[in-house]
Structure formats: structure tokens, C-alpha cells
Image: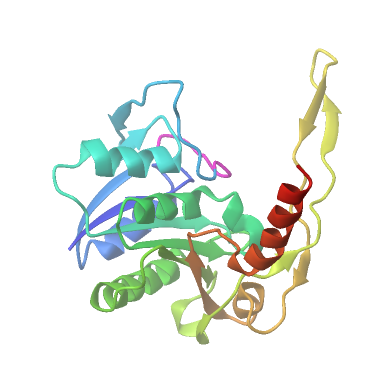
Amino acid sequence: MRILLSNDDGVMAPGLACLAKVLGEIADITVVAPDRNRSGASNSLTLDNPLRMMVAENKFIGVNGTPTDCVHLAVTGLLKEMPDMVVSGINEGSNLSDDVLYSGTVAAATEGRFLGLPSIAVSLAGPRCQHYQTAAEVAKRLVQKLSRDPLPKNTILNVNVPDILGSELRGFQVTRLGTRHIAEPTVKALDPRGRKIFWVGQPGPEEDAGPGTDFYAVNMGFVSITPLHLDLTHYKVFEQLSGWVDALEKSQ
């Protein structure tokens, strides 16, 4: 099995190194990741500048682009052989709830799925991440399962692992995305020249975090496995919008 690894914390991130080592026990690994931290890059592609690659000190391939750039470049132009799967991570910190909309970790997996490959995003949920080995072993088990039992098309797995020893994990839970309260206010400041600058505020606290959510699973010591469907169409609204269309056409 050939696995393409990427992340959004950068090519030298400890989570990426740990993941490569553990998955290297069961597969041929190629790592193509951003040359620096690109957290929050979401699904952005670099279209106004050329992409350049370099070989980092750890022999991984670094790219001066986003996580999406890395996976896209690897699959469509860099690798001689198509990988069988894309695994993104291990992210330093959780990707829960609406984090998935901004996460470069999830975006790398999403790009893999767009390009026709089974994909998993793996994050270590904790304020000061230490137990990357726990998340890597979880990823290894999920990769083996996914290779034997493929998921439906347009599906990726968003996996969040509590930052604890593997022996302390309480198990696995299939979860839905929770929700947060509105984000904290933007922080206003001045630069050394007296000009206004702004820092994006912290994510809002948990709102919907009850049983069944990704928040709840991680808080209770379980691995959260959330299947994400890449078709964003909201089919339940078709009937209501059809009524709008009828009214709009009659008003012309």
C-alpha cells in the first residue's frame, strides 16, 4: 500500500514525523507538506504564484504552498505512482465542530478525496500535545480498516484523538460535528508605527457538545470519528426553494 501524508503544521512538525514512522510499518510512505505552518488555510489553492518544492532536513518534501496545494501537486504532477490513500496530520490540536471549515488538516484530506483517493484527517486534541504516538497508532488501525472496507464516494474521516496514553483511551465513537458559540471578538492593537492591526479572536466555546458530538467523545476520553460528506448541497431545502423559483418567475 502507498500512502501520501500531508499536514498543515509544516513539514518539520512532530506529529507528521510520528505518523510517518508508524504508518511506515504497514505502507510505503511519501510525505509532501507545507514548508511552514499553514494552519487555517482551509481549501485554498495557490494560483497567483508558482509552487516550489524542497527536501527538508528530515527528507520529507516541503512545498511553499497550502496543504491543498501539497496534495494536489503530489497527486497530479509530482509522484510517479498514484497513492492508494491520503492521510493528513497529526494536527497539533483538535479539529472539532466548525474547525473543519478552516482546517488545513481537513482540507488536505478533502483534496485527496476530490482526486479520487480514500482520505483521513487526524488531529490530537489537547492544549499542549504530547501523545502523538497514541494518535499515530489510532491512524494505523483506521488505515488498515479503510483499506479493507472502503467508504462511500465523497466521504472522508475526521478523526480526533484525546491527548492521552493509548492505554487510557476508552474506545472509539462515531460522532457528528458539534457546534460552538460565536467566535471571540477580534483583538485590536497598534503596530510599532502606530497603525491599526487586528488579530482574529479565539474560537467560541462549546455550545452543542452533548452525547453524540465530537466534543463529547473527546472530552470523555474516546476517539471521535466523524464522517464528512463532501457534497454540500442541502437537499431538504429543495422544496422550499422551488416555491421561491415559482414565485420569482410569476413576478417577472
Relative placement, left or right, of 123 versus 6 is right
In which quadrant will I find the C terminus? top right
Q: Position of residue 177 (x, y in %)?
A: 62, 69
Picture coordinates of residue 90, whole percent (x, y): 44, 58
Whether residue 150 appears in magenta in the rendering, the answer is: no
Is residue 210 shown above or below 245?
Answer: below
Viewer-closest of 112 and 125? 112
Q: Is the residue 243 above or below the residue 37 in the image?
A: below
Residue beneath the point at 48% across and 45% down:
9
Question: Can residue 59 be seen in this snapshot?
Answer: no
Q: Front-most of 82 and 17?
A: 82
Q: Residue at x 69, y 54 (%)?
A: 245
Q: Looking at the image, which is closer to me, 104 or 227?
A: 227
Farthest-out residue, top = 193
Q: Position of residue 107 (x, y in %)?
A: 48, 50
| Residue 232, image x, y percentages | 55, 58
Of all residues shown, which one is farthest toward the bottom? Answer: 170
Q: Residue drawn at (32%, 63%), measured in percent from left and top?
A: 118
Q: Decide: is 145 above or below 170.
A: above
Q: Is residue 249 left or right of residue 221?
A: right
Q: Nearer the viewer, residue 158 or 138?
A: 158
Residue 46 in sight: yes
Q: In the image, which residues are magenta?
A: 34-41
46 displayed left or right of 245: left
